[in-house]
Amino acid sequence: MKEYQGEFRIFVQDAHWDLLRGDQRIANDDSDASIGGALMKGLNELVNKKLEGFIADKHRNLVLYFEDNLMLRIHSLRKSLNFDSTVPLFSIVVRGERLNIL
């Protein structure tokens, strides 16, 4: 049985996010989602890019660093304030192990 090592998916719900190359914003959660719009073009930049690292910064944002100077910042402040504060803000699943970032 072959395993696909290094392949993953990102699902973001109820959170603001920004995709940046260096200091330049490529797309965010409010970008045009139509075919050919900024959101789809921006997210396509991540396809086949190597994840080089991640951190939870001092503001409790999850920051994913990709090759080609791409950075996906997922903000800890949720779009809706109606949530249980005991639920982790982020979960990362790696090889079946779950890492929660509170």
Image (cartoon, rainbow, N blue to C red):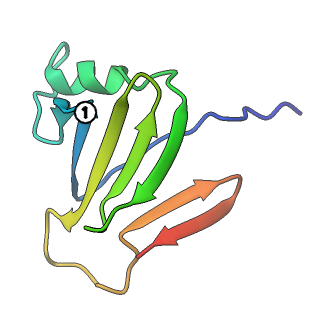
Image coordinates of residue 101 in percent, x first then y, are 45, 70
Residue, x 33% and y 50% (percent of image)? 12
Residue, x 43% and y 40% (percent of image)? 65
Foreground of the two, 26 or 11: 26
Horizontally, residue 30 falls left or right of residue 20, namely left
Q: Where 95 falls versus 23 (above or below)?
A: below
Residue, x 35% and y 20% (percent of image)? 44
Q: Where 24 falls versus 79 (above or below)?
A: above
Image coordinates of residue 95 in percent, x first then y, are 71, 52
Mark 1, secondary structure of its residue: strand
Residue 26 position by quadrant: top left
Image coordinates of residue 51 in percent, x first then y, are 52, 36
Horizontally, residue 18 falls left or right of residue 51, namely left
Say what amino acid the circle numbered 1 marks: Leu
Image coordinates of residue 33 in percent, x first then y, are 16, 28
Point out the image quarter for the N terminus. Answer: top right
Q: Which residue is mark 1?
A: 20
How packed mark 1 is, by other alpha carbons closer than 10 Å (few <14, some 14-19, many 20 or more), is: some
Residue, x 19% and y 33% (percent of image)? 23
Horizontally, residue 6 falls left or right of residue 43, namely right
